[in-house]
Amino acid sequence: MENVRRMPGQVRDMLNETMLRCFLTLAGNLSFTKTAQEMYMTQQAVSKHIVRLEETLGFRLFLRTRHYVKLTRAGEMYRDLFARYQEEFDQVTEEVTAYYMDLQKQIKLGYLEMLDISSCIADALKQARQKDAELRFSGVKLPQHELLEQFAARELDMIITYREFAPKESGVRSHRILNTPLVLLVSPEDPLNVPGATVADFRSRPFIKTAAGREPAAETRERALHQCRELGFTPEKIVVAPNLESAYMNAELGQGVFVSTMLSRVSLHSSLTCFPIGKEEELRCFWHENTENRTVARFADLLQKAFQAPGRHEDQPGPEGMGDHV
């Protein structure tokens, strides 16, 4: 056979799994008949694969007569090489399969601190575990900037936060899981907070806004002004708070008014006065579209169903029925 010289990379590109399996099987039993039976092929097909392999490598691999089949020296060397490759390939394939099977059995969820949504998450998790009892779940409440940072670093599979704080990177998918009423939080000590007061009485008060992540203060102010325009507010100044706790503290101390939602534990349980605004905020769950964990998208669907289940939030006060104090 003519020795065709090719570059190693070219040879690798021309090899395929069926070709190598035919070769290793034939090298093991030295019988075209047995090889054809084990490979569920015709003897002619096996012969074609062996010829193609020999042409690709540029060396004769078998000596063939009517009475016997024998490996050449080249055949012996390539048999040892491909056998090692097959063994390593099978081992890596087994490890990769185990890794991805384990990956599909875990969910790492983060959600915005101050949100009171654990019961809905528990409902979704219960549904998920009916399909896979071994599903491992870890949930963590985080400040907004840490939530976005850990999501971007793929330390969290999924996050739940308001649409306003949506991750900015590309390739992110999301579900709307809930609309919740917006309220204006005002300190009980504010001189305008008197019986009969309405949201309109506080439109020019200092407006408190929480920074989203580690964004510059100028961006936070721009978001605050955008929200003020939507609400018809004309604040005398914007107060930028580094996190939610600071925003609530500033409101309690009378440093300004703060817009929150009825999902906030502080809105529900603090001494701040809640004035219904008549608008809603959208809560969404976000995950990476190219995540290797297919369970994430399925869990997002379960979350959406859990939050939007009939009667799930009927006890949440709406803009019309909520009193001044919550």
Image (cartoon, rainbow, N blue to C red):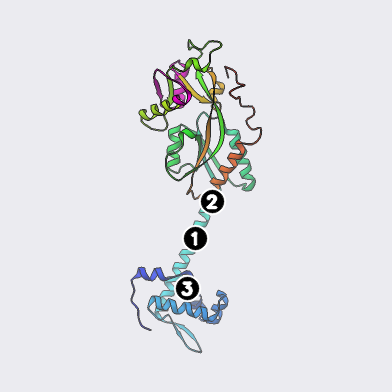
Which residue carries the number 2 mark? 102
Q: CA distance from mark 1 to mark 3?
A: 19 Å
**Amino acid under disc 3:** Met
Q: CA distance from mark 1 to mark 2?
A: 14 Å
Judge by depth and name the residue closer to the eye, 279 or 183.
Answer: 279
Expressed as whole percent of the image width and height from the top left, the position of residue 325 reads: 57, 17
Which residue carries the number 3 mark? 19
* Label annotation for residue 93: 1
Helix, strand or loop under label 2: helix
Q: Does residue 123 appear left or right of residue 80 in this picture?
A: right
Q: Which residue range is magenta in the image?
A: 228-256
* Nearer-N-terminus badge (2/3): 3
Q: Residue 234 sits in which quadrant?
A: top left
Q: Residue at x 42, y 29 (%)?
A: 223
Give the label, 1 or 3, closer to the camera: 3
Q: Is residue 215 above or below residue 204?
A: below
Helix, strand or loop under label 3: helix
**Amino acid under disc 1:** Thr
